[in-house]
Image (tube, rainbow, N blue to C red):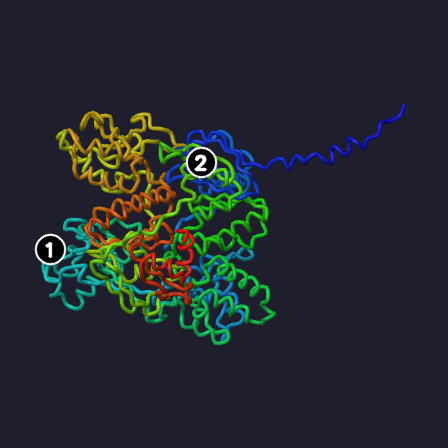
Amino acid sequence: MTTPPMTDAADATASAPHLADSHDLIRVHGARENNLKDVSVEIPKRRLTVFTGVSGSGKSSLVFDTVAAESQRLINETYSAFVQGFMPTLARPDVDVLDGLTTAIIVDQQRMGADPRSTVGTATDANAMLRILFSRLGEPHIGSPKAYSFNVASISGAGAVTVQRAGQTVKERREFSITGGMCPRCEGRGSVTDIDLTQLFDESKSLSEGALTVPGYKAGGWNHRLYTESGLYDPDTPIRAFTKRQLQDFLYREPTRMKIAGINMTYEGLVPRIQKSMLAKDREAMQPHIREFVDRAVTFTTCPDCAGTRLSEAARSSKIGGISIADACAMQISDLAAWVRGLAEPSVGPLLTALGDTLDSFVEIGLGYLSLDRPAGTLSGGEAQRVKMIRHLGSSLTDVTYVFDEPTIGLHPHDIRRMNDLLLRLRDKGNTVLVVEHKPEAIAIADHVVDLGPGAGTAGGTVCFEGTVEQLRASGTLTGRHLDDRARLKETVRKPAGALEIRGASTHNLREVDVDIPLGVLTVVTGVAGSGKSSLVHGSIPAGENVVSIDQTPIRGSRRSNPATYTGLLEPIRKAFARANGVKPALFSANSEGACPNCNGAGVVYTDLAMMAGVATTCEECEGKRFEASVLEYHLGGRDISEVLAMSVTEAGEFFGAGEARTPAAHRILTHMADVGLGYLTLGQPLTTLSGGERQRLKLATHMSDKGGVYVLDEPTTGLHLADVEQLLGLLDRLVDAGKSVIVIEHHQAVMAHADWIIDLGPGAGHDGGRVVFEGTPAELVAARSTLTGEHLADYVGT
């Protein structure tokens, strides 16, 4: 019997795809995070997928809270239980099936830490490499890399230590010393704080008469009794009559243990006590009244010892070719990269190559205008996101999922092309790139588009479209219809009612700029990223009695915070309920007397499971309503407080606008929220579930009732869908028509085209910018085409 030839079977096996190559999709089935409604999508791997949809449609819930969150959770589970105990616990997203996940690297818009010692250099590896370089080549040599770090203080000490040796206990004398680079005067902060004593007390009064004006130091409280009953001075004597010794004890005495009112306590001078209790905290985390006091009482001045460099005299004295580490950190990064490339030292060759590559990445990503000593807290959301991208640009990793949250934020149209190239480069290395984006220029480069909607909040959470960009254009979805929108130039512009004169502005990179900002009109300040827009506007127009400044600082909120508490809406609602029922307003707050005793007003009960994700279950007592049962018996207009907090802004606006529940104060706030396009939000929705765009507009709504005549807005289109931009333009028009002056820092061409007056800064970034390159109407800018902004605006409006 002859054996049949095996060639056909072998060929078939060879041509069949390997089983490992069949996992080309990330499959999501039944996603229900936040407002997602059983969403199922298939995302192609090793492609660039853009997620679009109106603000609040569920893009971030799908990409960040489902796909990226599960990837991170699964990676954490590969560690031992011991290690997981030290890591943040992540709950599994509410989804039926997640298949085909790869390692996710998240590059989000979270602002970088506002710690005063955190800089662009410390947030990347650049500072660490620079310190090593100076410790090897700096003359005179002063020590290890720590000697060049403004985060390390110089310490020395000596004493006896007990050592067990050969079964005997031996005492030995030991000495140690650490040479750090921290400036001893400002402790590495670069600025020193002076306290205005007149804001702490009224010297014409005695302590008994209430001389202290510090929040929390009211008569009768322990903070007040600490000083009135210390026995170091007479509490009935006016402070101005204190002797030199008494004033020293009152203001600056070192911590001293003593008995006060029969209790052992530590007495400390008023100034150091306030510095420890208030000034050591992050300003943004303070309660509003404390923040107001600190802003009033504390002045920040450049440290006279280190001239703001944060470094000790020894660290500044060690130089390479006449350049100290302070000089290097103060250089524009593009210049620093050129200086590093000019150092020919074979002994540190690998270090110079690595440092040069890192600095070149800054330039490549469009941040060459920054300096390494720039405080990290002063970076915009877009700049912070791009700084985080630095470490991934030269990475050799492939088959990784990179997740970006609007990477074009803060970018001029000219810079968006460069960002697109970077995203495509990451994809071409064999990575999956997921991008949440609104800008048409960024959507255009997608291999695959997922459009969520059709609306926001409860009206969103479904997939409206999946396919290519061309198919999206023809799809008829909201995004597809608006993708080719082009705003037109105004036929007539408003005439200014005056001018705000700025003379000799020199903040950051500004070069003695003189400019007149017209009042009573819509003025747009534009220019490439790093040209000096924010420096000009925020540095020259301080927020005061007549100026309302809405910047990009994020809203901080816990899971107990919601739109009603953040906007101040809950206050008139509580008072209205209290009046209607003849009880205390505190009953109608889930954080106060009315809270459900079982869940303390959270609505859910959290069970901590150590290294495993905690479990949140709806409270059985209040069924998630957050209030005590007796409180829900009180009604206003036929509704209890939990039903009111479950209303949407639009529904609540009608409820409080007329009838038995009519409350003008609440109705006014709700109207502002509807004006900024947040009519779909529910009043009790946790702030932690809101998207970046929704938080920005909530912030705008809270300032709408402010009395200021000048409104300063910093990129209000951040996080806004193309369709929402029209609504924003209408809102800006209403503000101007109401007699306000509106100044907008913006890159969006639709806002530029809609302006009455444009101030364009440039021509480049950093030391190549800082000058006004154009002032005039949008039509004049388009006609001249004399600047980068003019060219892009002309292309946009189709002239």
**Outermost residue, right direction?**
1
Calculate the distance from the C-alpha at mark 2 to the C-alpha at mark 1: 54 Å
| Quadrant position of the C terminus in the picture | bottom left
- Residue under numbered circle 2: 91
Q: Residue 185, how many percent across, how many down?
A: 34, 67
- Residue under numbered circle 1: 208
Answer with left or right where residue 698 lies relative to residue 73: left
Q: Earlier in the sequence, mark 2 or mark 1?
A: 2
| Quadrant position of the N terminus in the picture | top right
* Other residues around mark 1 within 10 Å, as few (<14) / some (14–19) / many (≥20): some
Residue 702, numbered circle? none
Q: In the image, which is nearer the foreground, mark 2 or mark 1?
A: 2
Q: Amino acid at mark 1?
A: Ser
Q: Looking at the picture, tell me which residue is in the foreground, 776 or 271.
A: 776
Q: Does residue 276 show up?
A: no
Which residue is at a point 53% across and 54% down the rendered structure image?
Answer: 393
Q: Residue 596, how many percent across, how many down?
A: 27, 30
- In the image, residue 131 above or below residue 461: below
- In the image, residue 682 above or below residue 441: above
Q: Residue 61, how many percent across, how many down?
A: 42, 37
Answer with left or right where residue 297 lies relative to residue 28: left
Q: How many marks?
A: 2
Which residue is at a point 35% across and 61% down the rendered structure image?
Answer: 760
- In the image, residue 255 above or below residue 302: above
Q: Looking at the picture, tell me which residue is in the foreground, 49 or 334.
A: 49
Q: Amino acid at mark 2?
A: Ala
